Image (spheres, rainbow, N blue to C red):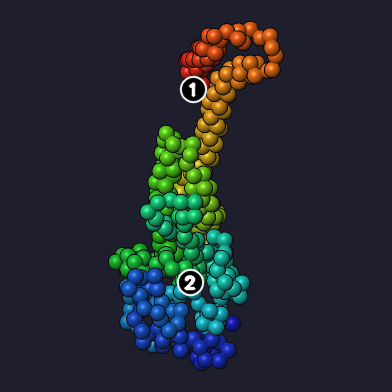
Amino acid sequence: MSMAGNLRKVTGLGGVGGLRKVARLARRRPRVDLSHPARSPLGSSVVNCVTYRDGVRTTARGDLVDAMEWVRKKGEGFVWLGLHEPTDREFAGIAELFDLHPLAVEDAVEAHQRPKVERYGETLFAVFKTVCYVEHEELTATSEVVNTGEIMVFVGKDFVITVRHGMHGSLGPLREELESDPGQLAKGPSAVLHAIADHVVDDYLTVTDSVQEDIDQVETDVFAETGARADPGRIYQLKRELLELKRAVVPLSRPLEDLATRPIRVVDPEIQAYFRDVSDHLLRAKEQIASFDELLNSILQAHLAQVTVAQNEDMRKITAWAAIIAVPTMVCGVYGMNFDHMPELHWRYGYGMVIGVISVACLVLYRGFRRSGWL
């Protein structure tokens, strides 16, 4: 079905999900990003809906349907629709209006998708995993270090639809930054796609820098004097959180490479050069994560080695004391036998001599073990 046909059809609250009602609710209430600290809940999943012409925000003309009709009629500009965790019903009318592929719509609503870029006819569908660092006073075996979310982006010739999942990864500041650079925004929807990709990858670098501080702290603790007694659960927790970060970063390499090198109709050729820069930043994040993984493995092995060394030292001390105690045990065991004819058994100074021999033997053994480092 053509875009014009969709524009005429999506008008009510019936099987199309009440698109006009959703748009009116979003228009009547303040357009704030849901992740903003001072946010107030909206009556729908619509966060913002803005029309741009020559990189400049234009005055709103009716609802979303009217805005798309105006853009199509003028043959210039585009509409940026922002959504936050929409339901099937809320997204149904939008999907029909923009002729979005059902598979892409399902991914956008259900979330929990692998980072990817797919083309459905004239529409590009991209999935980005967003990450944020969770602040904590002290790293423990149960501390959450990395929190993830998702941003799905539909890019067409004259529209951009962003669907965000999770309570971080706000696009409000990004929108303001783009609006301050009309020249870049005038390049069309692909400029928004690049800005989102750049924003997400920059967050990867920020999170990796923060994770490195945690790893440095764990490394310091392990190689401190009490390192052998350190909690290995913190190392395992960091590895688990690093795996979560890796799931967001590593799969994005191929999609960014495609955006930077393969000709795509809805991506401006000038924007492809910018995607190469984003790909370079992503490569840096990947290398950092790989090095962190290897470093944590080394730290864990060093910790286990320290534990083994400490156990060996304890065993040597136990063995040395057992050897020292064996001397009086042997002598006393001999004289504990009930024989009548034993050397010095009835001698007046026999007891003192035996105690002296035991003491001298134990002292010699003690000094020998101390000199060899066993005690």
Q: Which mark is residue 375?
A: 1
Q: Residues within 10 Å of mark 1 (few under 14, many from 20)?
A: some
**In the rendered structure, are the residues bearing label 2 and label 1 in contact, judged by CB atoms less than 8 Å apart?**
no
Placement of 178 over or under 242, stated as above or below: below
Placement of 72 over or under 103, stated as above or below: below
Residue at 49%, 51% in the rendered image: 141
Residue at 46%, 74% in the rendered image: 84
Q: Who comes first in sequence, dot 2 or dot 1?
A: 2
**Residue that sits furthest to the left in the current view:** 180
Quadrant of the rendering where the N terminus is positioned: bottom right
Q: Quadrant of residue 217?
A: top left
**Is 344 left or right of 217, judged from the image as shown?**
right
| Residue 146 percent across, percent down from the top left | 46, 56
> Could you give the CA–CA distance between mark 2 and mark 1, rounded to whole angstroms?
66 Å
Q: Name the amino acid type tagged 1.
A: Leu
Residue at 46%, 37% in the rendered image: 227
Placement of 23 over or under 32, stated as above or below: below
Please name whichever residue, 117 or 90, is drawn nearer the observer in this view of the structure.
90
| Residue 346 percent across, percent down from the top left | 60, 9
Residue at 46%, 88% in the rendered image: 20
Q: Residues within 10 Å of mark 2 (few under 14, many from 20)?
A: many
Secondary structure beneath dot 1 equals: loop
Asked whether the viewer can see residue 304, the reply is yes
**Is 66 left or right of 16, judged from the image as shown?**
left
| Residue 284 percent across, percent down from the top left | 45, 46
Front tag of 2 and 1: 1
Asked whether the viewer can see residue 268, the reply is no
| Residue 120 percent across, percent down from the top left | 58, 69
Residue at numbered disc 2: 163
